[in-house]
Image (cartoon, helix red, strand yellow):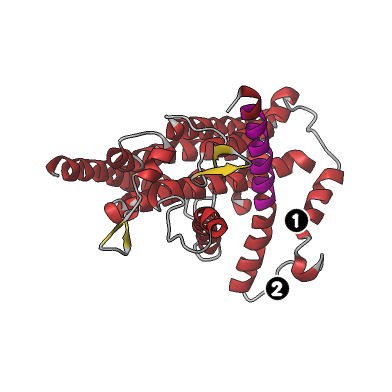
Amino acid sequence: MGIGTYIIVSLIKIVIAVFILLTGVAYTTLAERKVVAHMQNRWGPSRVGPFGIWQPLADGLKFIFKEDLTPPYANRPLYILAPMISLVTALTSIAVIPVGPWITVAGVHTQLQITDVNIGLLVILGVTSIGVYGVALAGWSSNSKYSMLASLRASAQMMSYELALGLSLIGVLIYAGSFSLRDIVDSQAGTWLGFIPKWNFFKGQFVAFFIYIMAAYAETNRIPFDLAEAESELVAGYHTEYSSMKFAMFFMAEYANMFTVACLATVLFLGGWSGPVFGPPIMQALMPVGWFVIKVIAFIFIYIWVRGTLPRFRYDQLMAFGWKFLLPLAIANIVITSLVVALK
């Protein structure tokens, strides 16, 4: 592949990935409102379009045309930069996640991934950790005590649970022997006894999967770990003083991070795009991507299900759960996994 063709293919993949991600973010908000409404015996959005399917478009237009207010004593450069940091880091993370195997289109052999780096997992962890700066700067630059308190809570929460999240992935790395996400998926190919997938989840990493899910909920400030946006205590959290599209950018970042977490869980624990492949050639080419999408959607549904089911932690409970339970459990999982691999 020549350099010109490589650049064109990369740009096409970037445009497609950003379009699908932003569309998914918009309609995940609708899906969440519909699913939670169903759980609570309500209708949910139903007025804009059939079954409310144009509600995300209406919400987007509302944010665009709303008055954009800036607090008079805010630190204006950082106030504007904060939502940009949150959204850009959330969108950047998707670049190294593989959604399918290599394919050939119009004579061009390419991978279903924007870029493949041999330290893809470290890239994602590094980029997502920068998102903490967006939250911290949003609360501090607003010059509001409510926002400042919420940003401190959120920053402490995100940094605390990042430790458990990172440690939960070491067992997967021990089995795969690589930081490349594509190598991790390849290490889970095949089955045992003809029907049990060789996913890391079934290799004894179900404890790590539980730790990852709990830490991911806390990382993305979702119930039961949504102390950063506890309306009954903090008005609206670290984005209290934001309006219009800057306010929307924080929510776009939150839902984009949900997709990143879901894609990463699929790649690390659920075999990525692996699954039964059959039928004509075109169907065999599309089915791996279909399996990947189904697993991601299932993970997003669990996200929404938990929101409609569980109450919020107290802040002391949240921190104790992370430091006194998840962290020791993650360390124990590393020790046991290392022993099992060493004895084999």
Using the image as rendered, state which of residue 59 and residue 161 is in the foreground: 59
Q: Depth check: 285 or 290 in front?
A: 285
Quadrant, the C terminus: top left
Q: Secondary structure at mark 2?
A: loop
| Side (left or right) of 67 relative to 202 | right
The type of residue carrying mark 1 is Pro
**Residue at which label 1 appears:** 56
For the residue pair 25 and 167, the one nearer the viewer reads as 25
Image point (75%, 25%), residue name: 76
What residue is pinned by disc 2? 43
Q: Give the magenta-colored segment's residue range.
A: 6-24
Foreground mark, 2 or 1, reads 1
N-terminal label among 2 and 1: 2
The reply, left or right, for residue 67 in relation to residue 79 is right
Q: Residue 222, position in %: x, y?
A: 54, 51
Q: Nearer the viewer, residue 278 or 48?
A: 278
Res 9 visible: yes
- Dot 1: within a 10 Å radius of its alpha carbon, few (fewer than 14), some, or many (20 or more) residues? some
Find residue 324 and report its horizontal and vertical position in percent. 32, 45
Distance, label 2 to label 1, CA atoms, is 16 Å
Q: Main secondary structure of the magenta part?
A: helix
Please give left or right for residue 119 compared with residue 259 in the image.
Answer: left
Pinpoint residue 60: horizontal percent, then vertical percent. Answer: 79, 49
Residue at 70% x, 52% y is 26
Residue found farthest to the left: 343
16 within the magenta span: yes
Percent coordinates x, y for residue 254 in the rendering? 60, 45
Residue plotted at (47% across, 54% down): 313
Residue type marked 2: Trp
Q: Residue furthest front?
A: 107
Where disc 1 sits, the SS reads helix
Whether residue 114 sits left or right of residue 212 in the image: it is right
